[in-house]
Image (cartoon, rainbow, N blue to C red):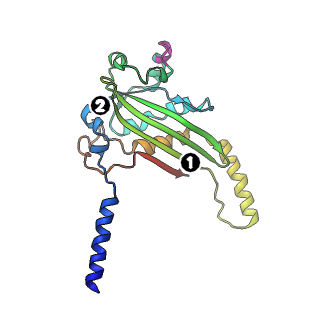
Amino acid sequence: MKRILLIIGLVAAVSSCGTTNQVTRGQQYAGMYEVKPVVLLVMPPINNTSNVEAKELLYTSISRPLAEAGYYVISPLLAMDVLKAESAYDSEIFVDSPLTTFRDYFGCDAVVFSEINTWAKKGFAIEANIRYFIKSAATGEIIFDRSCDLVLDLHVKTGGDSALSMLVGLAASAINTAATNHIEAARKANYFIFRDIPRGKYDPLFGQDMDFIAEEKDVSAVVE
């Protein structure tokens, strides 16, 4: 009996190893480790939704998680002024074009693009689907590519199960939903995407995280 249980355990262990897809950061983001970008230019998001505010809301919140990951990010305010002056505010024009002009003008090693595919308030939640990809300014190669399905839950918990408590909770949730700045959803989406990016030159883990297990390429999250 013990022998049978041992065999079953071994089979389960082997099956588990065979079905677990453990990919390292070095494998998933090989291009980042090859290019080793130091200076990043963040382009205005490509907005595929009807929410006209989503583009600027997301744009103002992308730089911080990248800077915290050890990269030098060109000031979005400075970049936006230059891009608008040069009629280059619409990133979709450049996403499939050579990026050497940006490298020469800004001195950047890589360019950060984003696509907003969903951005909507539904009930007491904000739903967003965003793709982020980084391209080498020298070659145009995509060296980082992830997407995020994010639901920002805005329900207010009242701590009671009575009808009155539930009614108060619904009213509070409605106020919270109306008052919540959409930039909070953008910040959380950025966090979930860039928390797995290889660390940059100005982070202590630079060049030492290649063997870290990478997160899924496309992530989903429900956050409060």
Badge 1 crowding class, 10 Å Cα cut-off, few under 14, some 14 to 19, many 20 or more, is many
Mark yes or no: residue 181 visible.
Answer: no
Instruction: Where is residue 91? Give x, y as percent.
Output: 48, 23
Q: Is residue 170 above or below residue 136?
A: below
Residue type highlighted by circle 2: Pro
Residue for badge 2: 37
Measured from the top left, where is residue 109 in percent x and y?
Answer: 31, 26
Q: What range of the chain is rendered magenta?
A: 83-88
Give the labeled residue for mark 1: 151
- What is the x, y in percent for residue 155? 64, 53
Position of the N terminus, as image quadrant, is bottom left
Does 75 sit left or right of 8 as displayed? Answer: right
Q: Residue furthest bottom?
A: 1
Amino acid type at image mark 1: Val
Rendered view: 152 above or below 144? below
Residue 108 in picture, x, y percent from top left: 33, 23
Between discs 1 and 2, the one toward the N terminus? 2
Camera-side residue of 45 and 188: 45
User: Residue at coordinates 34% horizontally, 49% vertically from top-left?
Assistant: 214
| Secondary structure of the residue carrying numbered label 2 | loop
**Hey, which quadrant is residue 28 in on the image?**
top left
Residue at 29% in and 31% down:
37
Of helix, strand and loop, which one carries label 1? strand
Left or right, 37 with respect to 169, comes to left
From this viewpoint, is residue 12 visible? yes
Nearest the camera: 48 or 89? 48
Task: Determine the image quadrant of residue 52.
Answer: top right
54 lies left or right of 208? right
